[in-house]
Amino acid sequence: MTAAQAVFLTAFAVVTAVIVAAVWVIVRSARRMDGGAYPSLAGLRRLGRRPADRGEMNRWAFYAHRVSGLAILAFLCLHVLDVSVYAFSPKVFDQVHHLYATVPMRLFECGLLLALLFHALNGLRVVAIDLWDLGAAAASRLLTGVLGVTVVVTIAGSVVILHPVIG
Amino acid sequence: MVQAVQRDNPPVQSRLARRAPYITIRVTGVLLAVLALGHFALTHVVNDVAATSSSFIARRWGSATWVVWDGLLLAAALLHAGAGLLAVVRDYRTRPRDRRRWLAGLAALIFTIFVIGMVVLVYSALGASR
């Protein structure tokens, strides 16, 4: 491993720590934020009780939106820095860039795709709710659609991303 | 209770100042749905990530379309993140002094990333066109 790769992996560890810290703050603050319980296994079980608890899904989508947004920003900071190596030395950039094609980084990229897709689609859902003044039932149906498209496209994208290392 | 509410709320702002983050998040958000997902699709699905090496960047930044795409993507993403972080910090940091410190720190981070990204993009694009 070269020095540049070691620096990248250290920075990547910092990004991971920031993401974990963001999840911790958001989950810990859930009770204070909107008077509900922390996201918990009991809460997860309540999600099965539809449609009476549709509001619960929106709340979870809100937390997931924050977590995915902060995770994408943390990665974006690292990504701008690793691409900036290109301006100094394309050779050193290629050393760092080799790491992106490794199996653990490809798995991370699948997670990144999941975060990007959910954040983008759920964000568009929020815009639609505001623009057309949608009610709870329509918002809930849209969320189901968001989750469905996110899961399907993430799986399809992950197959493409992981294909060179599996096949 | 009244005191708590007063302490939690920032001083009265103009209507535009109150609406600016809301509008910024939505306008850049719609833009990013295309720019960011397009960027990811191009570098991970259309091309394998192993192929996006320095020669790929050299080729890509030789084209004005992709330089503009990447510049817009960086600016939109950081504006979006800044406006989003404003809401996040206001939710989790209630003391005005804490808020100011967090917002100043995060603004400095975003500004630094923006400057580094833009300088690298323009410098490399000029180098590629030479």
Image (spheres, rainbow, N blue to C red):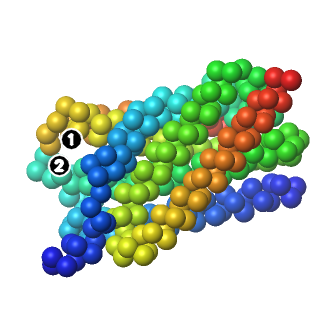
- Which amino acid, by three-letter code, is at mark 2? Arg
- Which amino acid, by three-letter code, is at mark 1? Ser
**Location of residue A120 with respect to B112 vertically, above or below:** above
In this figure, which residue is indicated by the disc labeled 2? A54
Residue B26 appears in view: yes
**The C terminus of chain A is located in which quarter?**
top right
Which residue is at a point 63% across and 37% down the rendered structure image? A162
Depth check: give the residue in front, B6 or B86. Answer: B6
In this figure, which residue is indicated by the disc labeled 1? A140
- Residues at marks 1 and 2, CA–CA distance in whole angstroms: 6 Å
Residue A11, x across and y down, in percent: 69, 60
Few, some or many C-alpha atoms within 10 Å of disc 2 (few <14, some 14-19, many ≥20)?
some
Q: Farthest front residue?
A: B14
Residue A39, x across and y down, in percent: 31, 64
Which residue is at a point 27% across and 49% down the rendered structure image? B15
**The N terminus of chain A is located in which quarter?**
bottom right
> Mark 1 touching mark 2, by CB under 8 A?
yes
Q: Indicate which disc, 1 or 2, sits on the residue closer to the N terminus.
A: 2
